[in-house]
Image (tube, rainbow, N blue to C red):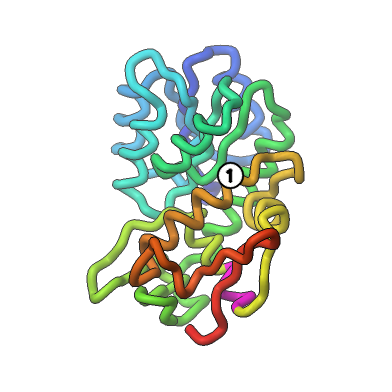
Amino acid sequence: MASLILVVEDDPAMLAGLCDNLDIEGYRFHAAGDGKTARALFESEIPDLVILDRMLPDVDGAALCREFRRKSESLPIIMLTARGEEMDRVLGFEMGADDYVVKPFSILELLARVRVHLKHRALGRPGDVTTQRVGAAEVDFGTHRVLREGVPLDISAKELDLLRYLVERRGQVVSRDRLLSDVWGYRSDVSTRTVDTFVARLRKKIEADPSHPAVLLTIHGLGYKIVSDI
């Protein structure tokens, strides 16, 4: 069955355009022009991906993003916004967004990001990777589960993508630009604060003391690495 995408956008013309393009690409979709409708559609059938406008008439998009994230840890969420400031991006990521697209945007670029996120989610389904220890956590990339002292932790799809990428390159230093390109599919001119925000979120899950990381290290001037003896 084709992937289901929930599109939440209060501009009727943009909403129609997004849905038309998703239809052409062969996706199923649900369309919502406000938060109330989006919540009802989400409850009726949990989508495979959400495209979510940051500014809605009845609810803050970031708050709605946080609600969706609580209900589905692995759900990819792409946030749309007319705001380009870095701190607004950081807020979206902190609320659980996996990606951030600033209006006006290229529909081809957005569709490419949709494909990448859906592919990554499919690769994370049960049976493909065994559980392994990463710092203070037990991570099963196949079932999208992270346990710490036996307690399940919330982790977004993009956080898991980043952790998987670094674990697969354990002992190697990976630059922020490379992470943006390979994990997010961003161009080199996109702010690197994105990576820093996600690294901070991961450290809270895998480090015994996130303020003094011993597993996910910053190599100043170069990037990040997961230590090899994990």
Task: Answer left or right for 150 relative to 26.
Answer: left
Q: Amino acid at mark 1?
A: Arg
Across and down, in percent, residue 209 comes to 35, 68
- Exactly how many numbered labels are in the figure? 1
Q: Percent position (x, y) of residue 224?
A: 61, 65
The residue positioned 60% from the left and 56% from the top of the image is: 119
Q: Please state the horizontal and vertical placement of residue 34, each as a whole percent of the image.
A: 39, 19
Q: Nearer the viewer, residue 10 or 66?
A: 66
Q: Position of residue 164 (x, y in %)?
A: 54, 68
Q: Which residue is mark 1?
A: 193
- Residue at image position (35%, 36%) is 42
Magenta: main secondary structure equals helix
Q: Residue at x 38, y 63 (%)?
A: 210
| Picture layout, residue 172 above or below residue 124 | below
Q: Quadrant of residue 136?
A: bottom left
Check the image and report above or below for 2 versus 101.
below
Badge 1 marks a residue whose secondary structure is helix
Range drawn in magenta: 165-170
- Looking at the picture, tell me which residue is in the foreground, 17 or 229: 229
Residue at 42% x, 18% y: name it: 56
Front residue of 101 and 230? 230
